[in-house]
């Protein structure tokens, strides 16, 4: 059975129950009350905003997929619309552009680079899933080499500190006998670790994909379908030296070592809400409100038989910061529950509205927003972890 105990966060009255089960730390947390806020604050406005309406310069961004901040303060943006990495100095001025569209060394195709991160040795790693490789550049944007990825595990989640690659497969087929019918289906995919050479190193197991509304022909072939608007899936992030995976069906995150062994399970109390038919109807009414009448009627007919899911996702996404905390975002909200390095809940943090966060540093947030014209910006926001004076 192992040892058991409780740890209290005295400042906010949160008590975590921790037990050991066959070498795995199980952390049970209470749901923090809505007023259980950490004394962390953000700047009133971004300290840096990279983006332009027009002009054709490097700061005119299109289909940004990711961004990272290097140790000396420069920011690398994965601009998939031009298949480039764009590097900016700490003051926002353009420093270099790397990559470009093509199939040669260090070039990208098909909506890539899909992600960018720091690589051991002050290098930059950019993910080119359709090219089945990871491209490595130095801090000045000069291409060094490419790492071929296992072709069954191309969806890179993040990079571990030792250079190993946290990734998942594309998932299998639907594998369901729903001939001539329709309903919710859900494939699964393997998550795992690749070594620094892109070869399989460890499997973390199979995890469910997103819930999908599918319509089948009488012969069993897929006629069509779409993701369920309230569908649950699986999300993950690197948490210090661990690979953290959360299935959104319940509030539970599993953290694995790079050798594939389960190290920690973090849970948090809370009731799961179930969407109603009125919720589903309202979602599609708003989504199709601006369509011409005939198109709107056709679109609504296509989702008329869509079933309800059992519950809304227990959470939206997980991220970790460079101070060792795990951040778990509430479903369709900018409120995050923050856990310490051991998985004990610390409290809630609300991030700037509309900011899709790529990276959380010790004293900054790096993320993406777009304005009413669709102009994209990568922004840096200051983060203070000290109580406001």
Image (cartoon, grey):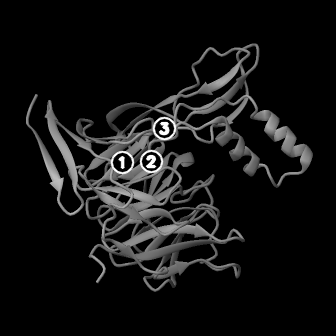
Q: Position of residue 59 (x, y in %)?
A: 60, 78
* Quadrant location, the N terminus: top left
Name the disc covering residue 165, or none: 1
Sequence-wise, the earlier of marks 1 and 2 is 2
- Would residue 79 be visible to someone looking at this image? yes
Q: Residue at x 26, y 59 (%)?
A: 324
Q: Position of residue 376 (x, y in %)?
A: 62, 70
Q: Callout 3: few (<14), some (14-19), or many (20+) C-alpha neighbours within 10 Å?
A: some
Tell me the quarter of the picture where residue 84 sits.
bottom right
Q: Position of residue 68 (x, y in %)?
A: 43, 67
Q: Residue at x 33, y 33 (%)?
A: 203
Q: Residue at x 34, y 68 (%)?
A: 361
Sequence-wise, the earlier of marks 2 and 3 is 3
Foreground residue among 260 and 318: 318
Say whether marks 1 and 2 touch (CB < 8 Å). yes
Helix, strand or loop at mark 2 = strand
Q: Callout 2: few (<14), some (14-19), or many (20+) C-alpha neighbours within 10 Å?
A: many
* Quadrant location, the C terminus: bottom left
Tell me the residue that label 3 is attached to.
151
Q: How far is disc 1 from disc 2 in space, using C-alphas?
A: 7 Å
Q: Residue at x 49, y 57 (%)?
A: 115
Tell me the residue that label 2 is attached to.
156
Helix, strand or loop at mark 1 = strand
Q: Position of residue 187 (x, y in %)?
A: 53, 28
């Amino acid at each position: 059975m192992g040892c058991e105990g409780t740890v209290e966060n005295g400042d906010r009255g949160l008590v975590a129950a921790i037990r050991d089960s066959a070498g795995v730390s199980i952390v049970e947390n209470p749901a923090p009350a809505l007023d259980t806020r950490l004394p962390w604050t953000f700047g009133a406005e971004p300290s840096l905003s990279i983006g332009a309406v027009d002009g054709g310069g490097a700061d005119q961004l299109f289909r940004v997929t990711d961004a990272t901040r290097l140790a000396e303060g420069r920011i690398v943006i994965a601009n998939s619309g031009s298949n480039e990495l764009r590097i900016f100095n700490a003051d926002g001025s353009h420093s270099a552009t790397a990559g470009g569209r093509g199939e040669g060394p260090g070039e990208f195709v098909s909506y890539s680079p899909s992600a960018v991160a720091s690589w051991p040795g002050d290098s930059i790693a950019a993910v080119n899933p359709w090219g089945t490789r990871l491209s490595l550049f130095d801090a000045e944007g000069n291409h060094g080499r490419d790492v071929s990825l296992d072709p069954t595990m191309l969806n890179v989640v993040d990079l571990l500190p030792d250079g190993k690659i946290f990734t998942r497969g594309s998932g299998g087929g639907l594998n369901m006998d729903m001939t001539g019918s329709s309903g919710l289906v859900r494939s699964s995919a393997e998550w795992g670790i690749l070594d620094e050479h892109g070869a399989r190193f460890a499997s973390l197991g199979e995890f469910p994909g997103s819930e999908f509304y599918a319509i089948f022909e009488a012969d069993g072939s897929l006629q069509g379908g779409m993701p369920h608007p309230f569908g649950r899936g699986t999300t993950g992030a690197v948490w210090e030296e661990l690979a953290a995976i959360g299935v959104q069906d319940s509030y539970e995150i599993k953290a694995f070592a790079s050798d594939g062994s389960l190290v920690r399970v973090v849970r948090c109390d809370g009731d799961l809400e179930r969407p109603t038919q009125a919720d589903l109807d309202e979602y599609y009414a708003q989504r199709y409100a601006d369509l011409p009448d005939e198109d709107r009627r056709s679109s609504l007919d296509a989702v008329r038989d869509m079933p309800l899911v059992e519950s809304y996702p227990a959470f939206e996404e997980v991220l970790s910061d460079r101070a060792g905390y795990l951040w778990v975002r509430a479903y369709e909200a900018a409120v995050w529950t923050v856990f310490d390095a051991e998985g004990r809940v610390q409290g809630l943090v609300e991030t700037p509205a509309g900011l899709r966060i790529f990276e959380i540093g010790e004293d900054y947030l790096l993320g993406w927003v777009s304005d009413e014209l669709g102009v994209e910006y990568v922004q840096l926001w200051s983060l203070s972890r000290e109580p406001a004076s």
